[in-house]
């Protein structure tokens, strides 16, 4: 399901985690649907179980960052192959924050 144009079901969520290999901290408000939140949670759980990040936290927050941007940050820092292997591949169904849409 492509939710990019459907902002009615999008909600802001604060996401935070620490990468184990270099202690880089990720902490942002992500604008995503409930489906995207589940997908990102599964991805972060898999990366945690593999020892690549510390346990992530999710909490309601104000919107300013989309799920697509969060997964892109993971790809750029951990590598596209690693993130893709854990379910963070490219594809439809990721919402970009309204402020970052073309």
Image (cartoon, rainbow, N blue to C red):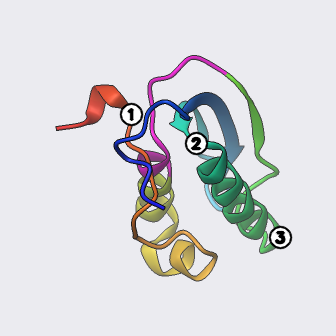
Residue in the foreground of this view, choosing between 73 and 43: 43
| Residue 25, x across and y down, in percent | 62, 40
- Contact between marks 2 and 3 (CB within 8 A): the answer is no
For residue 23, the mark is none
Per the image, the residue denoted by label 1 is: 97
Q: Earlier in the sequence, mark 1 or mark 3?
A: 3
Residue 93 spot, x, y in % from top left: 46, 59
Dot 3 lies on which element? helix
Where 14 sits versus 74, above or below?
A: above
Q: Earlier in the sequence, mark 1 or mark 2?
A: 2
Disc with the residue nearer the chain's start (2 vs 3): 2
- Give how far apart the Cα atoms at labels 1 and 2 are: 11 Å
Residue at mark 1 to residue at mark 3: CA–CA distance: 28 Å
Looking at the image, residue 88 sits to the left or right of residue 97; the answer is right
Element under label 2?
loop
Label 2: few (<14), some or many (≥20) within 10 Å? many
Q: Check residue 63 for magenta coloring.
A: yes
Q: Which residue is mark 3?
A: 49
Which residue, given by chain and number where applicable, does mark 2 sit on? Answer: 33
| Magenta region, main secondary structure | loop
Give the structural element (helix, strand or loop) at label 1.
loop
Q: Is residue 24 magenta?
A: no
- Figure disc tally: 3
Which region shows up in magenta? Answer: 61-70
What distance separates the C-alpha of mark 2 from that of mark 3? 24 Å
Q: Position of residue 42 (x, y in %)?
A: 73, 63
Q: Is residue 20 visible?
A: no
């Amino acid at each position: 399901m492509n939710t990019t144009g459907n902002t009615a079901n999008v909600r802001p969520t604060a996401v935070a985690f620490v990468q184990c290999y270099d202690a880089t901290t990720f902490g942002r408000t992500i604008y995503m649907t409930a489906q995207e939140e589940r997908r990102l949670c599964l991805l972060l759980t898999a990366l945690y179980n593999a020892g690549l990040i510390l346990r992530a936290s999710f909490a309601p927050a104000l919107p300013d960052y989309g799920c697509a941007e969060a997964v892109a940050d993971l790809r750029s820092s951990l590598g596209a192959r690693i993130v893709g292997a854990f379910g963070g591949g490219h594809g439809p169904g990721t919402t970009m924050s309204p402020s970052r849409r073309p």
